[in-house]
Image (cartoon, helix red, strand yellow):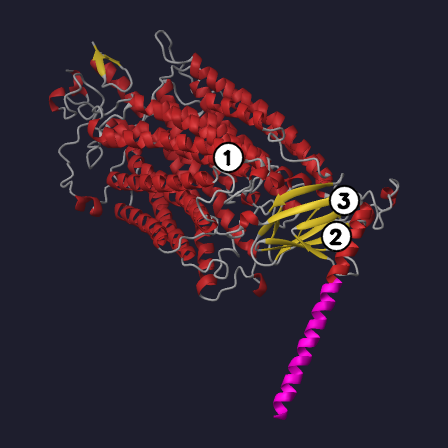
């Protein structure tokens, strides 16, 4: 028990946010953190009560002269009592979880629309969602996340082809929904400050969401064993103001288009030279 | 002497073969000359005696425990510094796969098979298990399973984790034969456990001493009975799914290949349908040990015998309905997640009931601080933390943050070491005198206990924080920028203390086999029938089997002896019994 206290102290001394899960990047991560704290309070009470009685009995009832063991075989009322007590605690945790649940699972409404314009708060009431996986108003940036040994690939929506590896750039205030899958083995998408992890399995699409509430860089890494370089499969989400996101998106689209054009030209040139060689060969 | 009044139960000093330590009548039976005919190595290979097989199991388990422990220390060395190059990623993955597989399949399950082998017939007053030759077969299958796995060390060990998730474990991503060695190990040890479980069930059903109804079965025997049923229900799923993987890998099957209509998620369901009951296979017998040890050293009957037996059955039943809480992050619908969250909550109730019953057993007792009692109390205090962190993991939104991080590593070691291993250590210190006829050194045992307890919490408590700080499991390196260095170093230091603690106990065993004080038949003043026969017991266990009238038959016999001889037994635990007139 001393060991327990000692390492408990060591734990609280080392850094600030190591007693609860990471939060502060996205509302769902914050709500999970809140839920964790609520369960912690109950857990702590149970922990202190049971360990307390255990230690107390160990000390108080240590064998010594004159102490006689009470020959008790049980106490039905007491036993039914603590069975019900344990059940009540769990009913309470269940209630708290279900109260919090919808706000963790269902995406928040975006603060900005697809053009970076603020969305009026009242619009939420007009576009109540019927599908859990879409935010109120249906307005979200939907990115396809694809896990591959050992890199994350992001496919952005829209008419232009925009994709990125490792670093995902998103606009602040816009709800981002993710369709997560994998190409080869199982991976798991996790950016701790932006919410929980979701496995990427080949043949399945997993869904989650986040909404970066402030600009920043959020780090994470693959959380399911995916092979030898599992430790090196990093992921970053960079949240930037909408205008900067727009610039990045357009720049990325132009880069990809240019690369594609260059590749097409190279291919054409190669084809031409090959067909010239072929015709030269056949004429000999 | 008045012993003649019940000649079957008592013996005279002149007949004593207990090395002359006992001077007055004691409740004990003489086993007339049924000596093991040979003690050479061949007798160990050909034996069908449940006691010898039990000892073979336990020594084999000890070897695998040392191997698995060394593997754990190698992993901790690698994580002791950021960007460490002590192990390369291939070696790291191989070692954690071997560590997990060893500790689960070659230590956690068979340690109970070994103890149950030795103790179950003695505790129910039987002369052997129901099928002695099948019992020997079980042991040899287990040994060959372990050898099949460890032979791969000389070629290419498996590296897809002890859970071998597909597609990583398929031929495409794990082409080496190490994965096949893992499958053969699962098959061989699985058969071993299944046959062993049937044997235990048949023994308990049919071979109990006269008068030993279900309400008088020792709680350790209850836990082994339920352990056996769980093995039959759960291990079948694992052997089936491992066979499917074998077919996929070697014979062109596509059970798990999504491009051919197979499912990568199917493996996880079938694996955890085994995997979660497996947790209870590992822990329930440890609970049984606690339920045996506490009443003896608190000198007080177990509090709520029926509640403890019933909660064992309830935990086992519910344990079959919670498997998908290992899969909260997979693509599954919210309804499924909610069901498995609630079923996981429900299982906390019988587990809590057990813990409270144990605490109530200590309450108002006279607690003797023997090493076995310390391990049992350490189990209660440590397992409680693992139980509470389990409730966090059962709340699936919280699990989304915590799963596959070091929080889970901490949680599982709190239940696997703090539960299973502490329980096994309690069993070792409690029953070693019965098995060997020698006492373990109590002082060394206490040192071992305190170092282990301190080292354990130093290693694993901090890992909760590592997990919440974002460190995933099974990564071979991290960078200094992650801020995980100090916490990992604390954990690494703790792991070496933990290793030292266990090593001391192993040394204690080896030393005490030759040099330990000679044990009397009943050194602890126990409650159950195994203390009724000499230490170590003769090959036939009992010449005559006493009638059982309560949960604590030996206490009844002791009272009867005192009545008949008019002598009160003065007792100090750990010393030979003496009487005062």
Q: From the viewer's side, name the closer residue of B349 and A57.
A: A57
Q: Residue at x 52, y 32 (%)?
A: B487
Q: From the viewer's side, name the closer residue of B300 and B467.
A: B467
Q: From the viewer's side, name the closer residue of B292 and B99.
A: B99
**x and y percentages locating residue B415 in the rendered image:** 47, 34
> Which label's residue is closer to the chain start, 3 or 2?
2
Q: Quadrant of the N terminus of chain B?
A: top left
Q: Are marks 1 and 2 in contact (CB under 8 Å)?
A: no
Q: Residue at x 13, y 34 (%)?
A: B33
Q: Residues within 10 Å of mark 1 (few under 14, many from 20)?
A: many
Q: Is residue B279 left or right of residue A43?
A: left
Q: Is residue A278 a member of the stretch shown in magenta?
A: yes
Q: Is residue A255 left or right of residue B379?
A: right
Q: Residues within 10 Å of mark 2 (few under 14, many from 20)?
A: some
The stretch of residues the image draws in magenta is: A257-284
Q: Check the image and report above or below for A98 versus B42.
A: above
Q: Quadrant of residue B423?
A: top left
Q: Secondary structure at mark 3?
A: strand
Q: Which residue is mark 3?
A: A240
Q: Which residue is mark 1?
A: B488
Q: Is residue A205 a member of the stretch shown in magenta?
A: no
Q: Secondary structure at mark 2?
A: strand
Q: Which residue is mark 2?
A: A142
Q: Chain of mark 3?
A: A
Q: Is residue B96 left or right of residue B332?
A: left
**x and y percentages locating residue B434 in the rendered image:** 26, 29
**x and y percentages locating residue B553 in the rendered image:** 31, 25
Q: Chain of mark 2?
A: A
Q: Quadrant of the C terminus of chain B?
A: top left
Q: From the viewer's side, name the closer residue of B20 and A73.
A: B20
Q: Nearer the viewer, mark 1 or mark 2?
A: 1
């Amino acid at each position: 028990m001393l060991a327990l206290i000692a390492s408990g102290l060591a734990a609280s001394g080392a850094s600030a946010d190591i007693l609860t899960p990471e939060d502060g990047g996205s509302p769902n991560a914050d709500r999970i953190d809140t839920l964790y704290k609520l369960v912690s309070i109950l857990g702590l009470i149970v922990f202190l009560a049971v360990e307390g009685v255990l230690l107390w009995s160990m000390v108080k009832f240590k064998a010594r002269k004159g102490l006689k063991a009470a020959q008790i075989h049980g106490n039905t009322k007491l036993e039914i009592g603590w069975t019900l007590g344990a059940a009540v605690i769990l009913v309470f945790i269940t209630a708290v979880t279900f109260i919090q649940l919808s706000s963790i699972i269902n995406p928040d409404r975006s603060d900005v629309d697809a053009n970076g314009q603020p969305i009026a708060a009242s619009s939420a009431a007009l576009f109540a969602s019927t599908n859990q996986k879409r935010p109120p108003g249906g307005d979200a940036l939907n990115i396809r996340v694809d896990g591959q040994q050992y890199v994350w690939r992001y496919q952005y929506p829209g008419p232009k082809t925009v994709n990125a590896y490792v670093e995902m750039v998103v606009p602040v205030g816009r709800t981002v929904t993710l369709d997560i899958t994998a190409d080869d083995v199982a991976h798991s998408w996790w950016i701790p400050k932006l919410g929980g992890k979701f496995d990427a399995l080949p043949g399945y699409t997993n869904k989650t969401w986040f909404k970066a509430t402030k600009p920043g860089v959020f780090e994470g890494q693959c959380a399911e064993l995916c092979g030898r370089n599992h430790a090196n499969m990093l992921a970053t989400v960079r949240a930037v103001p909408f205008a900067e996101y727009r610039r990045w998106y357009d720049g990325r689209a132009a880069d990809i288009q240019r690369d594609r054009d260059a590749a097409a030209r190279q291919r054409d040139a190669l084809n031409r030279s090959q067909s010239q060689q072929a015709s030269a060969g056949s004429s000999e | 002497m008045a012993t003649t009044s019940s000649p079957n139960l008592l013996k005279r000093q002149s007949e004593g073969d207990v090395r002359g330590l006992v001077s007055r009548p004691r409740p004990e039976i003489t086993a007339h000359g049924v000596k093991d005919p040979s003690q050479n190595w061949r007798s160990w290979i050909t034996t069908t005696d449940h006691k010898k097989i039990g000892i073979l199991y336990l020594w084999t388990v000890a070897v695998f425990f040392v191997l698995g422990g060394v593997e754990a220390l190698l992993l901790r060395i690698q994580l002791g510094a950021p960007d460490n190059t002590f192990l390369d990623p291939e070696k790291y993955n191989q070692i954690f796969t071997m560590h997990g597989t060893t500790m689960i399949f070659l230590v956690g399950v068979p340690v109970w098979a070994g103890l149950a082998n030795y103790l179950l017939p003695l505790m129910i007053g039987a002369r052997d298990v129901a099928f002695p030759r099948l019992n020997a077969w079980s042991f040899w299958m287990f040994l060959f399973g372990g050898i099949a796995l460890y032979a791969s060390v000389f070629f290419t060990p498996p590296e897809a984790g002890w859970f071998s998730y597909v597609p990583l474990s398929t031929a495409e991503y794990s082409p080496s034969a190490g994965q096949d060695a893992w499958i053969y190990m699962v098959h061989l040890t699985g058969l071993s456990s299944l046959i062993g479980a049937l044997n235990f069930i048949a023994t308990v059903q049919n071979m109990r001493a006269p008068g030993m109804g279900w309400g008088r079965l020792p709680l350790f025997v209850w836990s082994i009975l339920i352990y056996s049923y769980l093995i039959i229900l759960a291990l079948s799923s694992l052997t089936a799914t491992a066979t499917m993987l074998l077919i996929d890998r070697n014979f062109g099957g596509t059970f798990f290949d999504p491009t051919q209509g197979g499912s990568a998620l199917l493996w996880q369901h079938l694996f955890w349908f085994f995997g979660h009951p497996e947790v209870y296979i590992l822990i329930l017998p440890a609970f049984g040990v606690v339920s045996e040890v506490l009443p003896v050293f608190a000198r007080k009957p177990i509090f709520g015998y029926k509640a403890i037996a019933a909660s064992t059955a309830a935990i086992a039943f519910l344990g079959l309905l919670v498997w998908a809480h290992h899969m909260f992050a997979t693509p599954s619908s919210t309804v499924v997640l909610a069901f498995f969250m609630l079923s996981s909550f429900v299982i906390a109730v019988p587990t809590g009931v057990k813990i409270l019953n144990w605490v109530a057993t200590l309450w108002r007792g006279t607690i003797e601080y023997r090493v076995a009692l310390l391990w049992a109390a350490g189990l209660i205090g440590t397992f409680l933390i693992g139980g509470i962190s389990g409730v966090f993991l059962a709340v699936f939104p919280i699990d989304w943050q915590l799963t596959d991080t070091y929080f889970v590593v901490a949680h599982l070691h709190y239940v696997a070491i703090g539960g299973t291993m502490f329980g096994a250590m309690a069993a070792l210190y409690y029953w070693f005198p019965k098995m060997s006829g020698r006492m373990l050194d109590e002082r060394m045992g206490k040192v071992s206990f305190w170092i282990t307890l301190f080292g354990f919490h130093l290693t694993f408590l901090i890992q909760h924080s590592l997990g919440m700080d974002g460190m995933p499991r099974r990564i071979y390196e991290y960078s200094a920028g992650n801020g995980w260095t100090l916490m990992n170093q604390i954990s690494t230091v703790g792991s070496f203390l933990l290793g030292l603690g266990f090593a001391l106990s192993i040394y204690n065993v080896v030393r005490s086999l030759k040099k330990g004080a000679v044990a009397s038949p009943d050194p602890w003043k126990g409650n159950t029938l195994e203390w009724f026969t000499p230490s170590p017991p003769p090959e036939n266990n009992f010449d005559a089997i006493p009638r059982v009238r309560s949960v604590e038959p030996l206490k009844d016999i002791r009272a009867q002896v005192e009545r008949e001889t008019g002598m009160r037994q003065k007792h100090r635990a750990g010393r030979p019994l003496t009487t005062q007139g």
